[in-house]
Amino acid sequence: MKIKRQKHAKKTISFYKYNFSFREPFQIIIDGTFCHAALKNKIQIKEQLPKYLMGEVQLCTTNCALKELETLPKELYGAKLILQRFQIRRCKHTKDPVPASECLLSMLGETNPHHYFIATQDQELTKALKKIPGVPLLYIILNTMVLDKPSERTLKHVEAVQLGEVVVNPTQQKSIQSLKEKEGLGKDGEDKRGRKRKRKSSNPNPLSCLKKKRKTAMPPQPKKTDGEKKKRIRSKKRRPVGEKAVGSGPANA
């Protein structure tokens, strides 16, 4: 199961790298709900997140998220201690703090220009984030961290960019093109020679290439004619040593 999760995360990260110019170290904004779930499930965020995302990360939060935990019951005090260890990103609500969900949405804007990951357990916030293209979402389920697959809004945005319906920022387009060149791709998946890259065909199974053994046909046996008789081979019985045949020697007087 762990290998499957790693493959899923690697595929999703590659998608955001090639289509939205995400780079390491990945900036991950974490709220109090995620810290509370990690504490409850005994997950070490600083240790496990870099391993799961297979790269360097910067864990951060906002003042609004910290202020929100201060107003909540004492049961969330442990989550507050965890959240205080992360870097604090400046938001627009320094004087008048707002709920963490509202603050995070304002940090992303309409296009997530700073390429933030969001780690949260807030379902209402998650629904709102899925309406913004290019926002990777992290959450905890069954004692494990999961990187959610790209939302429908994100996939439609990528499709519109490929069709030329949406104009991309020149700097973003340049970074995407440089990533494709590193992979040996040009426009529309073409290689350096202008040919479209084909998937490498895997070698056939060597067992399926073995020649089938032909069954050797038995030579036809000649049919016996009526005049032929079966020859019986009589086996001579061996006589024990020292035993005399009856009537072979002279009679005793």
Image (tube, helix red, strand yellow):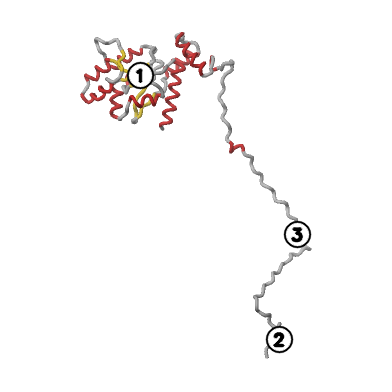
Q: Position of residue 184 (x, y in %)?
A: 53, 18
Give the residue type that dot 1 points to.
Gln
Residue at the image position 57 percent from the left and 28 percent from the top:
201
Q: Which mark is residue 58?
A: 1
Q: Which residue is mark 2?
A: 250
Number of marks in picture: 3
Q: Position of residue 168 (x, y in %)?
A: 45, 10
- Secondary-structure class at tag 3: loop
Q: Position of residue 226 (x, y in %)?
A: 77, 62
Q: Which residue is mark 3?
A: 224
> Could you say which quadrant of the image residue 129 lies in?
top left
- Secondary-structure class at tag 2: loop
Residue at the image position 28 percent from the left and 29 percent from the top:
40
Quadrant assignment for the C terminus = bottom right
- The disc, 1 or 3, on the residue closer to the chain's N-terminal end is 1
Label 1 crowd (10 A; few <14 / some 14-19 / many >=20): some
